[in-house]
Amino acid sequence: MHAGEPVNLQARVCIFRRYAAAWLLPLDKRQLAAALAAMLAACGKASVPSTPSAVELHLLDDAAISAANRRCLGCSGPTNVLSFPGGCDAPGSLLFSLDTLRRECLLYGQEPAEHALRLLAHGMAHLCGLDHGERMDAASAVFMQAAAAALA
């Protein structure tokens, strides 16, 4: 790539549907790729410690994310999103439970598309090296704005 040449950020996003009921997600694959690419592009504006070289999104059910949660973090039960930063040109990975997304939308009365983007922004902030707190909240807000603009 030459200096000044545009970068195709969507080429840096891979989405894997590992759940037969992927229809539970309120955004299609194109929208997800656009939202995540916009979040990647916003890393500089979000002032994060690091920017992933690429992002992999794995759409899972509660059983699969529970197994990952137990295996990787020693926690039992499902969660909404797990983040695994890459490094050395390895992509960061987001594991996203569609079952938990739907359950949380019903429980908290949130719109599914907005809540999905909020969870992905939260996961992206973790991929960028942030932990819970004010800096993460600020970066997540920048990521949400970027994703919303990409989908408008």
Image: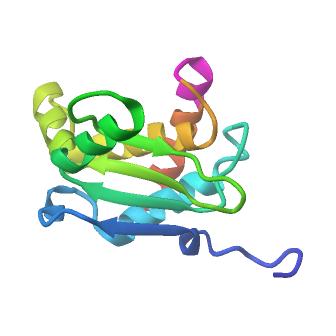
Query: What residue is rendered at 13% in x and 66% in y?
Result: 20
- Residue 147 in sight from this viewpoint: yes
**Position of 70 compared to 56: left or right?**
left
Query: What residue is rendered at 29% in x and 40% in y?
Result: 115
- Specify the farthest residue to the top: 133
Question: How far across and down, in percent of the image, does residue 89 sit?
Answer: 69, 62
Q: In the rendered image of this protein, does residue 92 appear above or below residue 112?
A: below
Indicate whether residue 98 is drawn in magenta.
Answer: no
Q: Which quadrant: the N terminus?
A: bottom right
Q: Which quadrant: the C terminus?
A: bottom left
- Along the line of sight, the residue nearer the viewer: 76 or 152: 76
- Along the line of sight, the residue nearer the viewer: 58 or 148: 58
Q: In the rendered image of this protein, does residue 79 appear above or below residue 50?
A: above
- Which scheme is used to colour this image of the protein? rainbow
- Where residue 49 sits, quadrant-wise, is top right
Query: What residue is rendered at 63% in x and 36% in y?
Result: 129
Question: How far across and down, in percent of the image, does residue 82 sit?
Answer: 39, 41
**Position of 25 compared to 119: left or right?**
left
Residue range in magenta is 132-138
Question: How far across and down, in percent of the image, does residue 88 sit?
Answer: 72, 58
Query: What residue is rendered at 34% in x and 68% in y?
Result: 16
- Where residue 151 sits, quadrant-wise, is bottom left
Question: How far across and down, in percent of the image, does residue 123 sit?
Answer: 46, 41
- Along the line of sight, the residue nearer the viewer: 46 or 79: 79
- Where residue 101 sits, quadrant-wise, is top left
- Residue 150 in sight from this viewpoint: no
- Along the line of sight, the residue nearer the viewer: 149 or 135: 135
**Position of 106 compared to 135: left or right?**
left
